[in-house]
Image: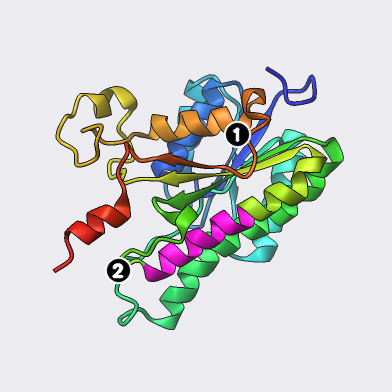
Amino acid sequence: MTTGSAQRRVALVTGSAGGLMRGVCVSLASAGYAVAVNFKPPRTHADDTVDLVRRAGGEAISLSADVAVPEEAAALVADSHEQLGRLDVLVCGAGPMIVKDAFDMTLAEYRAMIEGNLGSAFYTIKAALPLMRAQRFGRIVTFGMTGSEATMGMRRMAAYAAAKAGVVAITRSLALEEGPHGITCNTIDIGDIRDKDVDRAGAVARRDYRNPTMRPGSWQDIGDAVVYLAGEQASFINGAVLNINGGWQGFLAEFARWP
């Protein structure tokens, strides 16, 4: 599979020092991508992600940036492009989560949710679009939460849910604007995946979970979806929201627990 060029494919994954985005990096490396791993200072465990990518047979670099800051997001994209030679896939995985009633949330916490999730996606995408337009090829993958495509509310997650609904709206709008330039933009709505390090085999072995499949999700479930959306086989998928949640419907689960 190619990406409109004989050169190797290159992906930048924001927020990938750990968690599910670390697994996304490994999945992309296994599919033949060179990967730019992004970490927010301090470095934390970015080196572990790079090591896992290389073990999977991929090329990897690590780059420091707080993508909630526009200038740092732009510099990250530029550095990634300069060091790896091109940018085919942008995976917007950065985004903090605060679980707290809106009544108790401070303005600083609210801004962190909006800028860290919605702002970070927009800033990195905006920086990447000129590069992707120039090569007339690009794949942009963003992330929401279960229900984001329907602007679904969740108790104790008002700011986070609002930011993720905004991510879906921006992604769908960009799909309309950038499709003519060879760029697709899609969102993955992630369900309740609490163990960020378990692979699919480990997840399947458990049969005690609350979604209809009766097993938890894994980083491979998310990583394989990213690889699919990044590939030529998904070239006609644009502006879509892919739910990866085992059939779990967050709103119904919340409603069932209502006093």
Q: Amino acid at mark 1?
A: Val
Side of 42 relative to 121 (left or right): left
Cα–Cα span, label 1 and label 2: 35 Å
Please tell me which residue is depicted at 43% across the width and 50% down the height of the picture: 44
Residues at marks 1 and 2 touching, judged by CB atoms closer than 8 Å:
no
Look at the numbered disc 1 and give the secondary structure of its residue. strand
Residue 163 image offset from top left, x and y in percent? 49, 64
* Image quarter in which the C terminus is found: bottom left
Q: Which residue is mark 2?
A: 156
Q: Is residue 257 magenta?
A: no
- Which of pointers 1 and 2 indicates the residue nearer the eye? 2
The magenta segment: 158-171
Q: Which residue is mark 1?
A: 35
Q: Residues within 10 Å of mark 2 (few under 14, many from 20)?
A: some
Side of 118 relative to 123 (left or right): left
Q: Is residue 17 visible?
A: no
Q: Is residue 86 visible?
A: yes
